[in-house]
Image: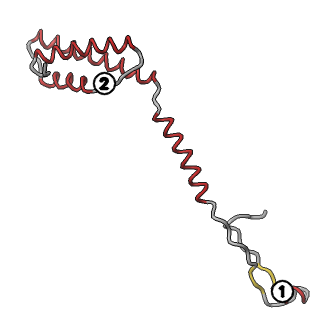
């Protein structure tokens, strides 16, 4: 098996005088080879380009994923409104509930579904009204 490449052991060959004498001589020298070109930088940049492409694909977000997050957020806002309704009936509205509602209003992503956007706008409006009633949303 022959090993080629930068880690290949160098061949030991007799010097010119020993070769002419029939190969019987005590003098040996290493073959001189041209220095190997460094190809590491090319492969590194190629791998970085591949990695950049993969990262770009991961950053490109699927509209379906955005829609799912918006639906999940809408359900979460409806749950907070339901909790607030129960707390109002009991007469025990906590600041934590109001803070959660305010945080939900602060996080909003646009989707490409107009009907979903309109529905979330309605839920947010109701959330803002309830927060304004509690003195937590600037009118």
Q: CA distance from mark 1 to mark 2?
A: 81 Å
Q: Quick one: quadrant of the C terminus?
A: top left
Q: Which mark is residue 44?
A: none
Dividing the picture into quarters, in which one does residue 133 lie?
A: top left
Q: Position of residue 69 (x, y in %)?
A: 37, 22
Q: Secondary structure at mark 1?
A: helix
Dividing the picture into quarters, in which one does residue 138 lie?
A: top left
Q: Is residue 66 left or right of residue 24?
A: left
> Residue at (74%, 64%) from the top-left corner?
3
Q: Look at discs 1 and 2 and give the one toward the viewer.
A: 2
Q: Residues within 10 Å of mark 2 (few under 14, many from 20)?
A: few
Q: Position of residue 12 (x, y in %)?
A: 77, 79
Residue 111 position (above or below residue 37): above
Q: Position of residue 73 (x, y in %)?
A: 32, 20
> Residue at (29%, 19%) from the top-left corner?
76
Residue 55 position (above or below residue 18): above
Between 91 and 127, the one lying in front of the other is: 127
Kindly give the residue lying farthest to the top in the view shown: 89
**Which residue lies under the disc numbered 1?**
16
Q: Position of residue 72 (x, y in %)?
A: 35, 19
> Residue at (38%, 11%) from the top-left corner?
115
Q: Is residue 50 left or right of residue 34?
A: left
Q: Are marks 1 and 2 in contact (CB under 8 Å)?
A: no
**Which residue lies under the disc numbered 2?**
108
Q: Quick one: quadrant of the N terminus?
A: bottom right
């Amino acid at each position: 098996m022959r090993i080629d490449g930068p880690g290949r052991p160098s061949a030991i060959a007799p010097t010119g005088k020993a070769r002419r004498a029939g190969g019987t001589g005590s003098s040996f020298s290493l073959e001189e080879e041209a220095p190997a070109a460094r190809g590491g930088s090319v492969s590194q940049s190629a791998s970085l380009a591949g990695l950049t492409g993969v990262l770009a694909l991961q950053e490109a977000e699927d509209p379906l994923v955005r829609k799912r997050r918006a639906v999940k957020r809408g359900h979460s806002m409806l749950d907070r409104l339901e909790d607030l309704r129960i707390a109002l009936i009991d007469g025990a509205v906590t600041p934590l509930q109001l803070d959660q509602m305010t945080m939900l209003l602060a996080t909003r992503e646009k989707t490409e579904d107009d009907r979903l956007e309109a529905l979330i706008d309605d839920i947010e409006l109701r959330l803002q009204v309830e927060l304004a009633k509690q003195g937590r949303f600037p009118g």
